[in-house]
Image (cartoon, rainbow, N blue to C red):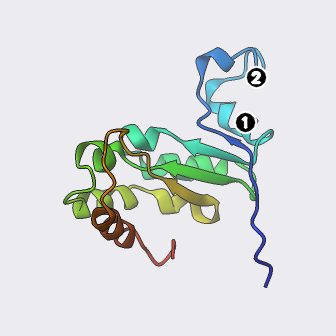
């Protein structure tokens, strides 16, 4: 079994107004920006999941708009990390995981959890959280 990893160069989102007419061709419709970015990068972070729940239809559309070997990195919900600070997050975590992420299918890559800079490291809290996010699809 080959245990070598795959390195992917990607971007942290794709809807950036200053990129229009610079990276994105002038006149490219906004709805085509992800497909265009996916022609140039092998991965992109879905940053909107940090700020709010996304719709399952959006995940499905993003999957359809990208090549078969494309991978999405999902940014974990700030509600869980910044507001709840990993305390009592069973329901919010279940809601986050049930929001449609699996509609990405084999294009679902890592879930990135960003923590507040002033949040102290608590090994027990992180361990409970780490074990709570395991699902059959994610291992």
Residue at the extreme left of the image, as rendered: 88
Whole-percent x, y for residue 51 in the image: 38, 37
Which of the 4 quarters of the picture holds residue 35? top right
13 relative position to 120: left or right: right
Whole-percent x, y for residue 33 in the image: 67, 31
Label 2 to label 1: alpha-carbon separation: 9 Å
The residue wearing badge 1 is 37
Whole-percent x, y for residue 59 in the image: 52, 50
Q: Which residue is nearer to you in this view: 9 or 56?
A: 9
Q: Which residue is nearer to you in this view: 2 or 99?
A: 2
Determine whether label 2 and label 1 are within 8 Å by CB.
yes
Q: Which residue is nearer to you in this view: 91 or 120?
A: 120
Which of the 4 quarters of the picture holds residue 4? bottom right
State the residue at coordinates (61%, 51%).
Answer: 72
Specify the label residue 23 is tagged with: 2
State the residue at coordinates (50%, 63%).
Answer: 102
């Amino acid at each position: 079994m080959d245990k070598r990893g795959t390195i992917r160069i990607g971007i942290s989102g794709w809807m950036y107004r200053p990129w229009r007419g610079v990276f994105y061709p002038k006149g490219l419709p906004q709805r085509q920006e992800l497909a265009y970015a996916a022609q140039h990068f092998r991965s992109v972070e879905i940053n909107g999941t940090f700020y709010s729940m996304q719709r399952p239809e959006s995940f499905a559309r993003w999957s359809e708009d990208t090549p078969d070997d494309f991978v999405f990195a999902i940014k974990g919900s700030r509600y869980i990390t910044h507001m709840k600070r990993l305390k009592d997050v069973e329901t919010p975590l279940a809601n986050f995981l049930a929001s449609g992420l699996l509609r990405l299918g084999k294009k679902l890559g890592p879930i990135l959890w960003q923590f507040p800079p002033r949040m102290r490291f608590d090994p027990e809290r992180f361990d409970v959280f780490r074990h709570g996010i395991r699902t059959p699809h994610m291992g």
